[in-house]
Amino acid sequence: MILSSDGAVAIGRQQTKWRIMLSATSDTAVRLIHPHDGLSISPDHPSQQPEPIAQANAQTSRKGAARPMTTADVPAVAGLFLKVFRGTDKPASTDLKGYLHALTLGSPSYSEAAGTQIYQQQDGLISSALLSVPMRFMACGNVIPGRLLGVFMTNRDSAGAAQLNLGLRPKKASLSFCDSASPTSARSLMAIGGKTIPMQNLEWVRTFRPLGALLGRLSPRLLRRIDPGLATLARPVDAFLGRLRGGDLESPAGLKVQEMSIPDFLAHAPRLIAHYAVRPLWSEDELGWLVGLAAQNTRLGAFTIRAIVDHTSATIGCFVYYASPGRTAHVLNILSLPGREVGVLGAMFRHLEDTGHLEARGRAQPALMAGLGLQRWLVFRHRAFAMALTRVPEVNDAIVRGDIYVGGLAGEDWSRLMCDFG
């Protein structure tokens, strides 16, 4: 959000977009802590000025209360989403309402306390909503509740936004995180004890075919009338640049990339992140549910999982991405046994190049930096702030030293709300 000098929120012709997400974490499953108060998080200090109200009783009708979202609220929340983020006031499609219901109310870890919160005025209008997906996390030896916070939306209602904002402070044993916070959101979280997660504000971009990738970025905006065959003409230029570049890392000796089934991924994923003090619990039912939702996001490509095995056929890592040969591979998660990250990254990048992708994109993490730094034609750029908020001292210590695994399937990038329903 953009704040004016007096703290009021300036809203342009399109409603301001704010996304923030949240989750809870734990280490080895020793005991289960149930959420008594739950967690709530809210937008960039939404102190926006309400529109002028002509009559006194109109102001009274705007008062209301925050409460958990129910199935009956889905059509209204879907309509609010379209109005705020898509600039249309039409009724929501069956597809959007079904997806929104599954996203907000379908988690195996769902509870009202950790679920989506809405603000309903006295006249019945739902004027603000903060979408969230409950998740369980391992945090320093305990299973604790949390939630991934997604889209925040408000129909120019400062009272509703402020009410949802009151739940931002953590309660009891819980942890919240977001991987899409704006600078204003990050400052708001830090003001109440939030911590930045090291490195994960950065997105890496690894280019395989520079001219083709450049044309791919320009074509949606500037080259709409140019024949698609232009991309074909870029191939010999990219091949020549590749020869000039030289010296790229080959796939590490003895490592192979293989197809990985969803059941195998569900079995291996918790093992591959078990060395993090703070990490998603990723039980079979919860991770399977997330994979099912992520696979619906076909706008980014085909949801794909690949395993990386060593010379003994043991799985040392895997990666989850949206495959889109001839375009960009959007990498959600790179999982690796500790100390094998360089090899896993090398094998992954070689596979993505060999399968015809122009470039690959993903989130930086401390454990990946050594391997990413060895890649040529790779750049970093600021994507959004990754933040975590908890009252548990041990978890705060783990966050500060980067001993936390979030992002991808434990983040927002897989959601269809980010790029669909336009």
Image (cartoon, rainbow, N blue to C red):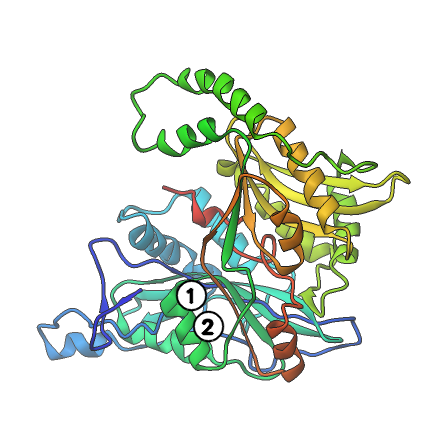
Q: Earlier in the sequence, mark 2 or mark 1?
A: 2
The answer to whether the residue labelled 2 contacts the one labelled 1, judged by CB atoms less than 8 Å apart, is: yes
The image quadrant of residue 168 is bottom left
Instruction: Return the residue nearer the eye: 402 or 225.
Output: 402
Q: Residue at x 48, y 46 (%)?
A: 416
Disc 2 packing (10 Å; few <14; some 14–19; many ≥20):
many
Q: Position of residue 342 (x, y in %)?
A: 71, 48
Name the kind of residue labelled 1 in the image: Leu
What number is the disc on residue 130? 1
Indicate left or right for 405 with 87 as reference: right
User: Mark 2 falls on what kind of element?
Assistant: loop
Q: Which residue is mark 2?
A: 41
Q: Position of residue 56 (x, y in %)?
A: 12, 79
Q: Position of residue 80 (x, y in %)?
A: 33, 56
Q: Residue at x 76, y 34 (%)?
A: 258
Instruction: Return the residue nearer the eye: 303 or 248.
Output: 248
The image quadrant of residue 375 is top right
Disc 1 packing (10 Å; few <14; some 14–19; many ≥20):
many
Q: Is residue 306 above or below residue 110?
A: above
